[in-house]
Image (cartoon, helix red, strand yellow):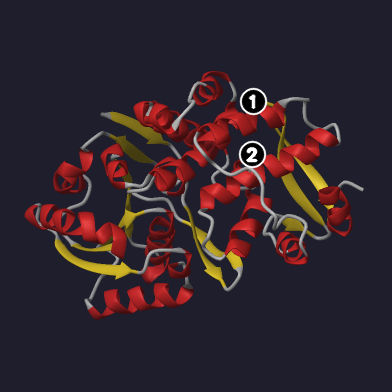
Amino acid sequence: MQMIDVNVKEHPYQIDLENGGSNAIGTKVSQLWSPRKVIVISDMNVADIYLKAVVKKLRDAGFTVSTAVVAPGEASKSIELVQTIVKQMSHDHFTRSDGVIALGGGVITDLAGMVASLYMRGIGLIQVPTSMTAQVDASIGGKTAVNLGEVKNVMGTFYQPDFVLVDPAFLTTLSDRDLVEGYAESVKMSLLAGGDFAELTGSIQSVADLKSKLVPVIEASLNYKRDIVVQDEFDHNQRQILNFGHTFGHAIELMAHGDLRHGEAISIGMVAITDRLERDGYTQAGVSDQITSRLLAVGLPVFSEYIGQDEFFDLVKRDKKRTDDRINFIGLAQVGEPIIVKKDVRKLEAFVKGY
């Protein structure tokens, strides 16, 4: 078991990284929370495999448990579903002394975090991420959000959990595709970090290789994101670098209408922005190749025909990292040296198409 302290100023908490740790979820939650009402929020895919056992363990530990199970996928990150779950909690007479437990991937950790932050202006939250994306990224740091139509994460809050339980055993039920798309976020962080973390992802040459190194990859990812979040909890400065690949990636993800996983779109986005920044001299020659080799080694995509289409430009211009007529693009001067490059939205097409 590895306990990782997240010492954010107002609400410090711990991440429990333990293979098989979810088997003791009742004990772990009872060490943090007194017996109370809890609502476990999950999606249908995860619920079919894990929800019954998790609910039993919580009830055995003295908790009164209700559940909210939603459809899998980005469509469940909606304000309408937040309202539905809040109404259910109100009907069940939840108070500010009760709690929310997220059991699922990034959509669920976002949705549950949003619910917890809004119910009676804030209620206890525990994150139990079951996907690679959620275990290395979405479940920690306190960002919650839902989508509004075609605009990702446009409504959200900063709300830190009381505890995060990361059990790599959950990942054994994922398809290779779903495992690998989450790994894209680890690759992203390793390129930002450099050093031993970058060497670790550079050493992974296949999906089987990744599976054999999952725990060190997850641990390195959690430690890196923890360090960034502690320095910049509310995303004013350094935390922006975690958006590497996301400005293009979010547009591609939306245009794919579910045909691309989040991490697959981010994979394409990292290569697309690095290609252009390397072309224009912001990035050291050869960095794009270093990124591409890591991604192709596990079968992640590195190109999309959506880049350069009219809808692509419209979506990028609506990105939340836009300030007035400028967009902050995150890139790398070299591996381990992130940079922020400001681009005029009126020259966005020329930047992307290279003229």
**Which tag, 1 or 2, sits closer to the chain's start?**
2
Q: Residue at x 33, y 48 (%)?
A: 130
Label 1 environment density (alpha carbons within 10 Å; few <14, some 14–19, many ≥20) = some
Residue 302 x, y percent position in the rendering: 63, 42
Residue beneath the point at 21% across and 51% down: 33
Circle 1: residue type? Gly
Q: Position of residue 128 (x, y in %)?
A: 31, 49
Q: Which mark is residue 336?
A: 1
Mark 2 Cα-neighbour bin, 10 Å: few <14, some 14–19, many ≥20: some
Residue under numbered circle 2: 238
Disc 2 marks which amino acid? Gln
Give the percent coordinates (x, y) of residue 124. Answer: 31, 57
Query: In the structure shown, which secondary structural element does the residue marked by tag 2 occupy?
Result: helix
Q: Nearer the viewer, residue 277 or 296?
A: 296
Q: Secondary structure at mark 1?
A: loop
Quarter of the rendering containing residue 348? bottom right
- Which residue is painted at 11% across and 56% down in the image? 56
Tell how many labels.
2
Looking at the rendered image, the disc whose residue lies closer to the viewer, 1 or 2, is 1
